Image: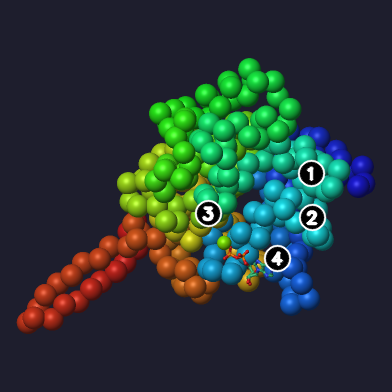
């Protein structure tokens, strides 16, 4: 690293994630992420959108160090992500799996939420404090001693989020958090995400969900960043979304149906 670069990082205390010229391939089949440059400031909530296969999950997995075999640089709070820094970076980066069943593996909710802080070597008193706090943050104190297999889908998602909150993460990454949730749980999750602290990146093809949680949105297509800016700017750009196999969020469409002579006309336009 040259001196200029180091000075830049020191000057910007608010920078949480720095990704520079990131390239990644799983195998010989070709680049899955290509020349990604992305920066996030402390406390930002950023939507990561893109059609299936665009590379959203891969990007999140790389940020949390699940695959270190990348080219370019990934820094979390100024620290270069690699073998030596992995444990430290993991301790402050929470990753919420798309499938909650992959995240929950202990018998009860409290045991699962205690797992990471206990594994990190914190005292039992501190572990208990962390568990109480994390359960309260996701409003499931009452599920503390419940068996994981008896939880509903929405409860599992909350428990999964609590398992990362017990480490007081500075960065929270969520992969398709609204997938498989019914409308009520989806709505509750939007409120919950908006209450969380820390730098949040939410990967989703549920564009309404992104609109309700993220002020900034990154559009990925075939492993490249196509747009990075204010959420509404991309979420109401039908042409851009359609060019990358996405559709306008429902809440930004107006559907008006007129019936003349028994025929139905449906008009859709972008709601200002
Ligand atoms: N473990 C893997 N091995 C090889 N290719 C993979 C693997 N996981 C994902 N891919 C490929 O990487 C591309 C991006 O996938 P992914 O990151 O899951 O996209 P998204 O989350 O946007 O749907 C896809 O072409 C997918 O087939
Ligand atoms: Mg995915």
Asked if labels 1 and 2 touch by Cβ distance under 8 angstroms, the answer is: yes
Kindly state the secondary structure of the residue where label 3 is placed. Answer: loop
**Residue placed at 23% from the left, 73% from the top?**
266
Q: Position of residue 87 (x, y in %)?
A: 78, 40
Q: Residues within 10 Å of mark 1 (few under 14, many from 20)?
A: some
Mark 4 CB within 8 Å of ligand 1: no
Which is closer to the viewer, label 2 or label 4? 2
Q: Which residue is mark 2?
A: 68
209 with respect to 120 (left or right): left
Residue that extends furthest to the right in the rendered view of this protein: 2
Nearest to N terminus: mark 4 or mark 1: 4
**Residue placed at 58% from the left, 20% from the top?**
129
Image height of 133 relative to 14, above or below:
above
Q: Which residue is mark 4?
A: 33
Q: Which residue is mark 3?
A: 99
Image height of 219 relative to 222, above or below:
above
247 with respect to 107 (left or right): left
Q: Quadrant of ligand 1?
A: bottom right
Which is closer to the viewer, label 1 or label 3? 3
Nearest to N terminus: mark 2 or mark 1: 2
Nearest to N terminus: mark 1 or mark 3: 1
């Amino acid at each position: 690293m040259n001196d200029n670069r180091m000075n830049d990082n020191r000057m910007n205390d608010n920078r949480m994630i720095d990704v520079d010229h990131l390239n990644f391939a799983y195998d010989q089949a070709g680049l899955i992420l290509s020349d990604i440059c992305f920066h996030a400031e402390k406390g930002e909530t950023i939507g990561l959108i893109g059609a299936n296969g665009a590379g959203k999950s891969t990007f999140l997995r790389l940020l949390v160090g699940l695959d270190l075999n990348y080219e370019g640089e990934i820094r979390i709070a100024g620290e270069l992500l690699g073998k030596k820094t992995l444990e430290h970076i993991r301790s402050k980066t929470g990753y919420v799996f798309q499938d909650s069943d992959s995240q929950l593996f202990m018998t009860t909710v409290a045991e699962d939420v205690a797992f990471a802080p206990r594994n990190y070597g914190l005292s039992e008193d501190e572990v208990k404090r962390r568990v109480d706090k994390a359960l309260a943050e996701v409003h499931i104190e009452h599920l503390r001693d419940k068996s994981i297999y008896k939880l509903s889908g929405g409860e599992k998602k909350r428990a999964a989020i609590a398992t990362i909150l017990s480490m007081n993460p500075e960065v929270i990454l969520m992969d398709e958090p609204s997938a498989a949730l019914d409308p009520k749980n989806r709505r509750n999750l939007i409120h919950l995400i908006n209450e969380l602290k820390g730098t949040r990146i939410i990967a989703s093809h549920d564009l309404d969900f992104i609109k309700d949680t993220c002020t900034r949105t990154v559009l990925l297509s075939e492993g490249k960043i196509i747009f990075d800016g204010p959420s509404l700017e991309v979420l109401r750009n039908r042409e851009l979304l359609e060019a990358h196999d996405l559709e306008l969020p429902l809440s930004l469409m107006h559907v008006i149906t007129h019936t003349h002579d028994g025929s139905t006309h449906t008009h859709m336009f972008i709601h200002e």
